[in-house]
Image (cartoon, helix red, strand yellow):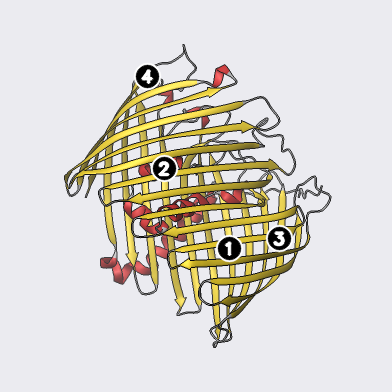
Amino acid sequence: MRVNRPETTLGLGEHGVLRAGSWFVVLGLVATPALASDWEITPRVSVSAEVTDNVLLAPRGQEESDLIGTVRPGISLRRDGPTMDTRIDYSLNSRRYLNESREDRATHSLRARNDWEIVPDTLFLEARATRTENAASLLGPVGIGASTPRDNLQETTRYSISPVLRTRYGSFANQEIRYTYDEIRYHRSDRNNSDAHRAEYTLDSGAAFNRPFWQLAAFYEKERYEDGVEGEFSQISATAGYRFGRSLRLFGTVGEEFNDYATTRDDDDGGFWEVGAGWAPTRVTNIEARYGERFFGKTRALSVDHRSRRASYRVSYNEGIGSTRDRRGAQFDVLAEQLGTTVDDLFDQFTLDEISFLLALAGLTDEALVEDYFFTQTWRASWRYDTGRSVFGVNAFQTQRESEIRSGFGLFEDNNRRTGVNASWQWRYGPRTTTELATGYTRTRFLGTDREDDRWYLRAGVTREITPDLSARLSYRHQRQDSDSAANEYRENSIIGTLTKEF
């Protein structure tokens, strides 16, 4: 086991958030002075009232009902320019409880990105920022939407900035050099803040190569946690492949890894290889499979993707070693992929609250975070069918993670296996009325212990567009958890009325 513990910590003070905000302000000001009219600005506010029979998700016999009021002001900003593309979605979520006033809270939701083409086709700058609310621990009560009790909530801010240099060597090859600085900060939490520096290099074959293709690649990444724990990962690789017509391609990769992170394995780096095949039997169907070997053993990956005018389905499997911070924020990409859209369109089509619920439906909510490195295996399957008036969806997943070295944090929440399935139906009843029904089940098994949690939920609602910029929603929610630990069982029912106004 190798763990680097420098004498000094990261020094991530409150100014870290200010630095992130400053970058976005500067990037925004570059485009603003002469191009203010190019901005699309949409302020909005939502007001809701919620009646619940178990406000703290307490065990049976300890339930308490409450009336909850929520005010959610927000704003969306869009700008699509010739050299700069900016998208910002922000909302402030203020919840007030009639009886349990200690549950009162104000949290933030943010997704922001800025892509700037500094030198045409050559130099680019990409900036990202997110602020999310999530459960601090799988061991405590975890509810759907904003129903998780305050004692088990934390907020996470993540921001990154990435300059990119792209060079085209005629039709022979295309080169990309990228550096990324990435920082994660936790609020109302004892989790360790962290940052990462990553440098990447790729050289891909150009248009001069028709059927054969190749790539040379390398990367180096260093992660640092505020308590002094560090991890370093680097890799060099070469890939070569051949296309047999339009439908079949075969490829192979060889390389070397140079890693230094906390693990009980005898080896944490070394040579690796991988072979794979991609098959596109039709224009709407793609299948890819990979098999190889790395320092921790055999590696396998599979993806099957089919998209037609009405239906889409996807099956995927992957495995590998990484830190928990690697997976933060990736859930938006996976959700957009399952829905057959882009992340930008996802935020255009749905509100932040709706996206949070869709993430829960797909089993993509953030895992309870432990500062550690894990071997993770993930299966996912999704099906979606759109008739025009109705949209049906089914998702299934299984994720198992095993710590490379038990961290000592979170008792036995380090290693777990989560399995779930859910289904949803959205029906456009009329030109301005939509109904929704969703249900799901998740089982969490804490490996190495006798504890197993089963979570069920059901949500039904109807939304009415009163005017083009005013909508009303009424919904019912039921959720429950069965556990080997009686103290962690709960039942909850609630009725929620929401009014949303855009300006």
* Above or below, comparing residue 79 to residue 223 in the picture: below
Q: Nearer the viewer, residue 198 or 419?
A: 419
Residue occupied by mark 3: 292
Residue occupied by mark 1: 180
Most extreme residue toward the left is: 467
Where is residue 452? Give x, y as percent. 60, 27
Whether label 4 touches label 1, CB < 8 Å? no
Rate crowding at label 2 as few (under 14), some (14 to 19) or many (20 or more) other CA atoms within 10 Å.
many
Where is residue 265? Give x, y as percent. 80, 48
Left or right side of 381 for 343: left
> Tag 2 or tag 1, which sits nearer the N-term?
1
Residue that appears at 44% across and 40% down = 361
> Tag 3 or tag 1, which sits nearer the N-term?
1
Residue occupied by mark 2: 356
Residue occupied by mark 4: 53
Q: Is there any visible trace of residue 148 in the rendered image?
A: no
Question: In the structure shown, which secondary structural element does the residue marked by tag 3 occupy?
Answer: strand
Q: Nearer the viewer, mark 4 or mark 3?
A: 3
> Tag 3 or tag 4, which sits nearer the N-term?
4
Residue that appears at 78% across and 54% down = 268
Q: Amino acid at mark 2?
A: Ser
Q: What is the C-alpha distance between the residues marked 1 and 2?
A: 27 Å
> Tag 2 or tag 4, which sits nearer the N-term?
4
Question: In the structure shown, which secondary structural element does the residue marked by tag 2 occupy?
Answer: helix
